[in-house]
Image (tube, helix red, strand yellow):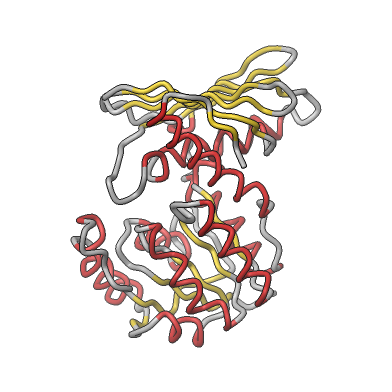
Amino acid sequence: MQQPLKLGMIGLDTSHVTAFAAILNDPGHSHHVPGGKIAVAYPGVPSADFALSYGRVQQYTDELSEHYQVAIVDSAEAVAEQCDAVLLESVDGRVHLELFKAIAPYGKPVFIDKPFTTSGAEAKEIFDIAARYQVPVMSCSSLRYSEGLTENLLSAQDSTIIGADCHGPMSLEPTQPGFFWYGIHSVEMLYRILGRGCLSVSVTTNDDYDVITGVWKDGRIGVVRGNRKGNYQFGALIHRVEGTSYVDASADAKPAYSGMLERVIRMFQSGKADIDTEETLEIIHFLESANNSRVSGTTEILP
C-alpha cells in the first residue's frame, strides 16, 4: 500500500483550511479522502485590505495546530522543503503568483485553490513557471466535482450535450474582480459540462443579478445565472439531444470538497492533473472577458 503523502498548506485565511483538514486528516470523517495528510503549514501574510483574510487567519491557524497537530512554520519555502505536495489555499487570488514563485523551485506538485489568479496574464505566468520547473499544477472550484454533476455526466457518456444553464450565488468582493470571487463556481460547472472552446461572452447585469452567456465555437450556448438575493443553491440544466436533466449540486450527500480532494490526491500521486492546462487558462479568460462585458455592455471575444 502506498504511504500517505505528507502535505503542506500555504495560506490559512480561508474556511477551506479546516474543511480540508477534516476530510484529509480524520480517518473517521464520513467522507474521508485517504492518501495524504496535512503535516506542515504556513499562515501567510494576510491581505490588509481584505477582511476575510486578516480577520480569520489566526483562528484557522490555531485550529489547524491544536486540533490536527499540524506544524506551523514561518515561510512558504519551509512548507515546500518539508512536504511531498502543496495545497496553496490563500483566500486572496492576487497573492497566488508570488507564493507560487517562491515554492516552484522545490518541484512539488501544487493545488491552487480558487481563484487561481485574478488575471489571464498571471495565470499564464504560473503555468510558464510550472513548465520551467516541471511542477504539476491543478486549480478549480469544488463545484466542478459535485456528486450530482459527476453522476449525471457519467450516466449519459454516450449522449451529446448541446448546451447548459448553470446557476448559483454571485456575491462580489471588491478585492477579487467581478466574477473571480464567486462566479468561478458556476463557471467551473459550465466548463465541466461543455469543455473548452468558448468564443465569446456577453453579460446582462443589475444590482441583484448577473447573466453570463457564452457562445462556443461549435455553436453551443452556455449560460451562468447568478444572484445576490440570498438564494445559495447551485445547480445546472444539462441539455442533450434526447432531453434536458437537472442537477441540484446543493443536495449532494457527499461534499464537493471530497470529490475535488480525491482528484487532487490523485494528481499529487501521479503528477497528472485531472484538468487540462488550456481549460484552466480558458476559464480565467472567460471570467476576465465576462468582467469586461459586465462593465462595457458589449460582447467580448476570448483571447
Q: Would you identify the image quadrant in which residue 180 lies?
A: top left
Left or right: where does residue 66 sit relative to residue 278? left
Question: Could you say where residue 219 lies in the image, as x and y percent from the top left?
Answer: 71, 21
Q: Position of residue 65 (x, y in %)?
A: 30, 76
Identify which residue, 168 or 147, lies in the foreground.
Answer: 168
Question: Which x, y percent locates residue 201?
Answer: 55, 29
- Please tell me whether residue 105 is drawn above or below residue 123 in the rendered image: below
At 64% from the left and 33% from the top, the residue drawn is: 198
What is the quadrant of the C terminus in the image?
Answer: top right
Q: Residue furthest right?
A: 158
Residue 12 in view in this figure: yes
- Front in this rendered view, residue 65 or 227: 227
Number of numbered markers: 0
Image side of residue 84 versus residue 11, left or right? right
Residue 282's place in the image compared with 240, above or below, is below
Q: In the figure, 297 relative to 53: above or below? A: above
Please tell me which residue lies in front, 184 or 291.
291
Nearer-the-camera pick, 115 or 265: 115
Q: Is residue 146 above or below residue 20?
A: above
Residue 162 place in picture, x, y as percent: 70, 20
Q: Residue at x 21, y 70 (%)?
A: 58
Measuring 60% from the left and 71% from the top, which residue is drawn there?
129
Residue ID at (68%, 39%): 196
**Left or right relative to 38: residue 243:** right
Q: Is residue 114 visible?
A: no
Residue lying farthest top?
A: 243
Asked which quadrant contains residue 1, the reply is bottom right
Examine the image and state in which quarter residue 181 appears. Answer: top left
